[in-house]
Amino acid sequence: MAVKTLRKMNGGQIVFTLSNIEDLIYGVTFDPLSGSGRIVTNISLIDRDDVDNILPIFRDVMLSGLTVSPLAKILSPGESVNDFIIPDGKCGIATVCSITVDGILLKHGIPVKPRFGGLVEVRDGNPVRFTDLVRYDSTTIDPLEILMSQSLTSVSDMLTTGSGKILANLREITMNARDRVEETLDDMASVGLSGILEVGEPNTDVLGVSVERDHFGVVVAGGTNPMAVAQEQGFRIDTHAMSSLMDVGDMVSIDRLV
């Protein structure tokens, strides 16, 4: 199993992705019971001419369960989300980031430890094991962006044959919160937030990865799987994972955009 790390300097200090994740998690206010609040989004930049071709790809992946939500928003050139501005000649597609799950769990009093982003091997529709991992506390770039840049995914194969390599994230949660986690995940699923690939048992490996003592692992499908498929099919796409917070009311089902 390969574990890769990247580092960069920012103002003389090393800033790891985990710090950004923690900031975004605390900013999540989405409540599954009310269906309102802020969620974490990924933003993908694409050529304006490719919008009509890429949106159906996103729809197919999102409706297959390989993301946490089918919600999306189209961003026009010049439009901004927080400090992110869509450049001329491009369109943006905002989608729900899997880190939103961590934020919702935290708001329900459940402490979450994001550990890895990686590739999960799927055989006949069943997740089998992580094959590559990048630790959040050892990289300054989103792990799933790193893996996408290496062309290691085969999400398209997964959609057509049931077997392939998809993007996913692993977090650890204290075993004492297991019942509450399952209740919260059920509440999320009732409003269309899913993408849970595996909920492990306490003190037990999850998809081949060990967890800390008295914890269990939860594996969530990566929100960047649609971008991976677009890339696999030859489209140019610039993905900014864990980009910003957005009010869920500003987003609509991907079906309404295609």
Image: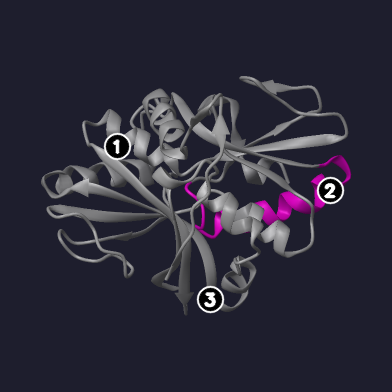
Q: Nearer the viewer, residue 158 or 237?
A: 237
Callout 2–callout 1 Cβ contact below 8 Å:
no
Element assignment for label 2: helix
- Whether 22 is drawn above or below 7: the answer is above
Say left or right for 144 vs 220: right
Magenta residues (range)? 47-68
In the rendered structure, find residue 50 and report the number of the disc placed on it: 2
- Residue type indicated by callout 2: Asp
Let me know if residue 152 is in the magenta part.
no
- Coordinates of residue 177 in the picture (x, y in percent): 15, 43
Q: Nearer the viewer, residue 213 or 4?
A: 4
Say left or right for 153 vs 49: left
Q: Give the CA separation, mark 1 to mark 3.
A: 30 Å
Count of marks overlaid on the render = 3
- Whether 30 is drawn above or below 155: the answer is above
Mark before the other along the chain sequence, 1 or 3:
1
- Residue type indicated by callout 1: Leu
**Quadrant for the N terminus in the image:** bottom left
Say left or right for 179 vs 155: left
Please name the residue that numbered disc 3 is placed on. 162
Give residue 21's quadrant in the image. Answer: top left
- Whether 27 is drawn above or below 166: the answer is above
Say which residue appears at 48% left-offset and 33% top-offset: 15
- Coordinates of residue 162 in the picture (x, y in percent): 53, 76
Coloration mode: one colour
Let me know if residue 50 is in the magenta part.
yes
Please name the residue that numbered disc 1 is placed on. 105
- Residue type indicated by callout 3: Gly
Callout 1–callout 3 Cβ contact below 8 Å:
no
- Coordinates of residue 91 in the picture (x, y in percent): 78, 36
Residue 59 appears in view: no
